Image (tube, grey):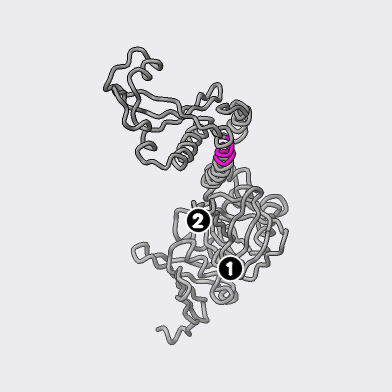
Amino acid sequence: MALNDMSDLLPALELLEKEKGISKKVIFDALREAIHNACNKNFKNPAVAQNIRVDIDETKGTVRVLLKKDVVDAPQDDNLEIGIEKAKTIDPNLEVGDKVEVEITPRNFGRIAAQNARQVVMQKLHEAERTMVYDEYKEKEREIVSGQIQRKEKKNVYINLGHTEALLLPAEQIPGEEYRQNQIMKFYVIRTDKTTKGPQIFVSRTHPELVKKLFEQEVPELHQGIVVIKNIAREPGSRSKLAVMSKDPQIDPLGACVGPNGDRVNAVVNELSGEKVDIVVWNEQPDVYIAAALSPAQVLSVRVDPESQMASVTVPENQLSLAIGKDGQNARLAAKLTGYRIDIKSQTLGRIIIDDEEDDYYPPMHDDEDD
């Protein structure tokens, strides 16, 4: 590289611009700043530093350091002033009182420029790669991605997404689910943050939208918008309930989501490590919807009070435990799915009231105590 020539750098910059999306202008601007700072340290004179300009010909790659001086009759400070006679050798039209830029490119400027060029290019390349990763995963927020379990540190799980890493916090992990090194899993992208160490991607295995997105990947009718998931209620690792509807009366939303021989729903269940999934048909009539939401239990009757969002459900005696579910789970998920507080009773035994909060579980009471 010549004393003030950086033309050898141009092919590399063009390659970076083409492959990494880093414009040459961005790098040249950074180079000007870096070389200017190096020159400031070299001169160690604040007055001189303020009047220095780094000129880079972006086409040829030539670099010059210019110092602005006052044109005077008799210069007192050679760093800030230039005599009129010498000034006219630069530009014959100059007069006393004008300002002129004088080239002061240092002898070792080629080495300085080359060092700064390498540092700036590497820095800009690193910044560009971080920006590209951030932009990529910012667009993938509220979508699912595949990743490989990389390692566990304390209770955090780190996921290899290919050219970056994601973090699965304890609160986003399915209870009891194992995360083995090199295991491939799917994750829901919650958010992407900018940090001093680069983009930080947070993912989840517990978010209800993970279930929705998995079904959208398996069910063409969902992806096409013919079938719609109206609501999801989920207790991660245990059971989920989905309410679906079809915009096309000839398409069965339940059958579309279950798939031939249950292939579609089974694919989702397998991805969720065996979490059970109930699919029900959404209905605008609350009583029909609530009855469906309590499946697999059979329901005899549903009386609803839309104003209080309360539903009274009667089931056959042999269906009460099924309607309630283990620890009240089936009824609790049905309440979450429909938004109704559900009062379940059998024809002869007793009743249970469930709403969409975990702690609103009431043990069955005998009918005579309730009267």
Q: Residue at x 61, y 67 (%)?
A: 237
Dot 1 corresponds to which residue? Answer: 297
Q: What amino acid is found at the position of numbered circle 1 in the picture?
A: Ala
Magenta span: chief secondary structure: helix
Displayed quadrant of residue 11: top right
Position of residue 220 measured from the top left corner of the image (x, y, whole percent) = 63, 43
The part of the chain drawn in magenta is 114-121
Label 2 crowd (10 A; few <14 / some 14-19 / many >=20): some
Q: Is residue 118 magenta?
A: yes
Place of residue 370 in the rendered image (x, y in percent of width and height, measured from the top left): 42, 83
Asked whether the viewer can see residue 276, the reply is yes
Mark toward the viewer: 2 or 1: 2
In this rendering, position of residue 235 left or right of residue 43: right
Comparing 272 with 331, the one in front is 272
Q: Residue at x 67, y 52 (%)?
A: 264
Note whether residue 227 is visible: no
The numbered disc on residue 52 is: none
Mark 1, secondary structure of its residue: loop
Q: In the orientation shown, which residue stands out farthest toward the top? A: 92
Compare residues 73 and 256 and report the one nearer the observer. Answer: 73
Disc 2 from disc 1: Cα separation: 20 Å
- 74, above or below 118, in the image: above
Which residue carries the number 2 mark?
A: 231
| 287 and 259: which is toward the camera | 259
Give amino acid for label 2. Answer: Asn
Q: Is residue 327 above or below residue 68?
A: below
Residue 365: % across, % down: 47, 84
Q: Sequence-wise, which precedes: disc 2 or disc 1?
A: 2
- Tag 2's secondary structure? strand
Quarter of the N terminus within the rendering: top right
Measured along the vertical axis of the image, is residue 283 above or below residue 327?
A: above
Q: Is residue 322 left or right of residue 282?
A: right
